Amino acid sequence: MSPTILLAFIIGYFVLLLAVAWYTSRNSNNDSFFIGNRNSNWMLVAFGMIGTSLSGVTFISVPGGVGSGNFFYFQIVIGYLFGYIVIAFVLLPLFYKMNLTSIYTYLEKRFGINAHKAGAFFFILSRTVGATARLYLVISVLQIFIFNKLNIPFEATALVILLLILLYTFEGGVKTIIYTDTLQTTGMLVGLVVCIIFIIKALGTDFGGAMSMMSDKGYTKIFNWDVNAGSFALKHIIGGMFIAIAMTGLDQEMMQKNISVKTLKDSQKNMMTFTAVLMVVNFLFLILGGVLYLYASSKGINVPPDDLFPTIALSDAFSGAIGIIFIIALISALFPSVDGAITSLTSCFCIDILGINKKEGTEKEKKRTRLKVHFTFALIFFLMVLLFKAINDKLIIDFILKFAGITYGPLLGLFAFGILTKRKLNDKLIWAVCIIAPLLALSLDMLSSPAWYEARLHVKLGLQNISDTIFNGYKIGTELILINGILTFTGLWLISKKSSQSVNRLQAV
């Protein structure tokens, strides 16, 4: 398909986003940017959060992973269900009771300023790296199939995309993103369903026949009961549960949208509706992966997993329509994860690091500070995308889950310690615990999976014999985040003492 035509549709899509942004950001202020004036429609929030949760990585890497991992990824999705129940009925009531703008303010009220700063820091670190990794993957696909053919360099593509995202987020923030995410989630889901239909039709069968063919290949196997495997069912389910709690419930980007809903009851309805839809959508992505591999096998296509979907969708075998649908769906999957990340990082840095809500000053002065931070994060995103390009590792979903397991562990430990205990922490030692615990978790993971790190670091770690001796073939998987959280919780216990004062202070809020 002509890259010029695809580019024209991308430009048209951006124009539509800018029109929505202009309409929704009228009369906006800092409160609109940070929490949407606490007046967001819960149904729009629930639907828009689908796009934020999935991102372009899910759109490409989850289908690509079916060839080697069958439907094992759905074990993690089952774990998400239990995690979202905890968020809806444990975390959201707490956040609403305290009337929070930033969820990390809870840590300051419970433990002190260092806990607050540590929580904000680990969110900023994790979200910056995770969002830019997702951005890099999608830009790489667009670059290969469109912009290289137009002789547009990668750096220019990344810069223009980030500038366009800035244009529709810098004024309205969360208030705007609620609507643009709804539009983009619609584009992504329509694209997903249409692509499945097109590819099944190209296989010369119907949905039932395609499922039967996938079953014969073993693709539809959901549960893995091999205890030593990284995809062992219980590890995936438990790991998925705590990934959901940490990466949604303790994540300012996701909770920023939830607490923008007027009432707790509506926010809980939002969370559970989002959960039900997310499970269905993830299963559709796995079905897409299965039919992609069936089609690739029938046509002798052999490409890396993350290139499979774009290679087939943009091939000459299909009409131009599916190529356009794929590109629109892909960027619809990309933007909710990037625009929300930049907005939430701006909010977190302004509120949790700079304390903009506590400082005196006019609305205009605070807005000027917020805009500076917003543009700074956009620049950081650009530099990080260039760094990922230099590394050039497309197995992004594995990296994101590993990195999340390391950086969200301290958040999981801090919030769990605050909610489950009445103990008071030595504020001066909180940073030490939050740094040492992830390093210990990383060391354990490297010992259990030396080959994973060797392949990415391109060095000989010399850890295979140690791994076989200590772990007896056991591989740490998605439960890394739980291990990290437990190590953080244990470290916090060691620097704590009995006291009801901190809890009384919190209850007085």
Image (spheres, rainbow, N blue to C red):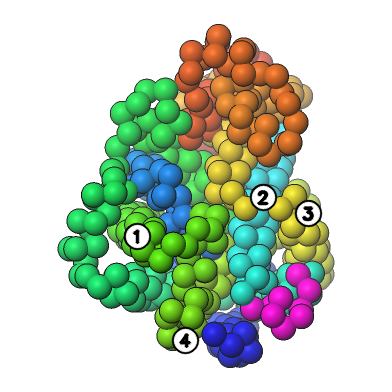
C-beta proximity under 8 Å, tags 2 and 3? no
Q: Which of pointers 3 and 1 lies earlier in the amino acid sequence?
A: 1
Q: In which quarter of the view is residue 456 placed?
A: top right
Position of residue 437 in the picture relative to residue 54 (left or right): right
The circle drawn on residue 393 is 2
Residue type, numbered disc 2 = Asp
Q: Which residue is mark 3?
A: 390
Callout 4: SS? helix
Residue type, numbered disc 3 = Ala
**At which x and y percent is residue 118?**
70, 37
Q: Which residue is mark 1?
A: 294
Residue 438 visible in the shown view: no
C-alpha distance separating marks 3 and 1: 33 Å
The residue under the point 46% across, 26% down is 420
**Within-10-Å neighbours for mark 1: few <14, some 14–19, many 20+:** many
**Within-10-Å neighbours for mark 2: few <14, some 14–19, many 20+:** few
Q: Which residue is mark 4?
A: 320
Q: Which of pointers 4 and 2 lies earlier in the amino acid sequence?
A: 4
Callout 1: SS? helix
The residue under the point 52% across, 46% down is 247
Q: Nearer the viewer, mark 3 or mark 1?
A: 1
